Amino acid sequence: MDLFKDNNNIKKSDLNSENFSSSRLDNVKLIMEYAVKFGIFYESEDHIQLTDLGKDIQKNIGFFTWAVGGYGDFLRNFTEVNELNNITMSSMIDGANVALGSRQANKQFMWDIIIDELSLLKAHNIADLGCGGAGAIIDICKKFDEVSATGIDISEKAIKSAKTNIEKNGLNNRVEVVNQNVLDAIDSPYLIEKFSSVDTVLSFMMMHDLFNIRKPVDIIKKLMSTFPQAKTFIIADTFLSEETSLKQNTPIFTYGFEFVHHFMKIKLFHKQEYIKYFSDSGLRVEKVTYLNVPNTYLFVLKRDLV
């Protein structure tokens, strides 16, 4: 799907040894062949193009990556979880694909809304909590020449991938990533100085995880102290569904999201609870925007600095 990018078709001539290693090229061609048989792609003499089914898959690829690539092993084998035998849920989860799936869904359904908000804010120094492979801050810095950014992620594997992506995009002078638990970052003298210049804090789809570590208001106040000069916090997250029973048109993502978090013993919250936590922490809710994914919203929060 990455080959198509913003187009509905690609040239067959682009499938060559200049763009792919020989082993990968064989795999790509084999996948293309089966995708045509399954009605995902249509093949003409010179081009391969997306069918309507293919366009739908391209749009929803993030949910596929998240569920099948990230949680697939667990969803297939969750009855085997047995801590006595060291078979844990975390050992069945591919965190890299969870992050990638979230990023793909963000780009497809939410990214234009987020970029519009950043355009209005005129941010200059951004911190991204749980940056993963740094895809979000790379895109932001490519979009806004005046922005520099710092990504923070607890995963060493994610940070390694992020550094590679930053170098590939030629952004070493504007984007930095650190392998750190954001709640401990305030204890690092180097990061204290670095974070003191951050004016905008981003958090995409991880606030519910932080809220399970400490009381939500304490978490928010900790972030506010970690970034003492940040006037704006942009937070996107998925909330607990208000539905009390399964309906025919309920998106599968809704219960898939709640199911896996239940097994991880991660409590999910309602949207109104978030609004109360933000208010109790001293942040002003300026805007709440639906992000085209079930139970998922973007908050633009402001802080008045003395």
Image (cartoon, helix red, strand yellow):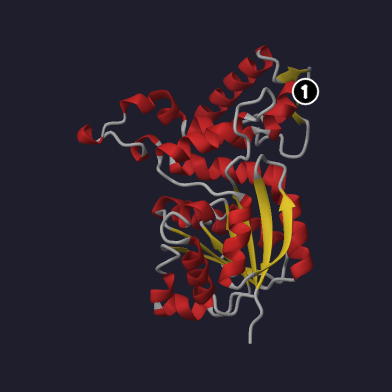
Foreground pick, 94 / 88: 88
Residue at the farthest front position: 244
**Which image quarter holds the C terminus?**
bottom right
Question: Residue at 64% across / 83% down in the picture?
Answer: 305
Spot occupied by residue 219 in the image (x, y as percentages of width and height)? 48, 65
In the image, is residue 39 above or below residue 178?
above
Spot occupied by residue 300 in the image (x, y as percentages of width and height)? 69, 63
Amino acid on which disc 1 is placed: Asp
In the image, is residue 195 above or below residue 165?
below
Spot occupied by residue 9 in the image (x, y as percentages of width and height)? 77, 29
**Which image quarter holds the N terminus?**
top right
Say whether residue 267 is visible: yes
Question: Residue at 60% across / 33% down in the picture?
Answer: 244
Mark 1: few, some, or many residues within 10 Å (few <14, many ≥20)?
A: some
Residue at the farthest top position: 37
Quadrant housing residue 123? bottom right
Question: Residue at 61% across / 40% down in the picture?
Answer: 241
As helix, strand or loop, the secondary structure at mark 1 comes to helix
Foreground pick, 79 / 132: 79
In the image, is residue 122 above or below residue 213?
below
Spot occupied by residue 85 in the image (x, y as percentages of width and height)? 21, 32
Foreground pick, 168 / 179: 179
Say whether residue 18 is visible: no
Quadrant housing residue 230? bottom right
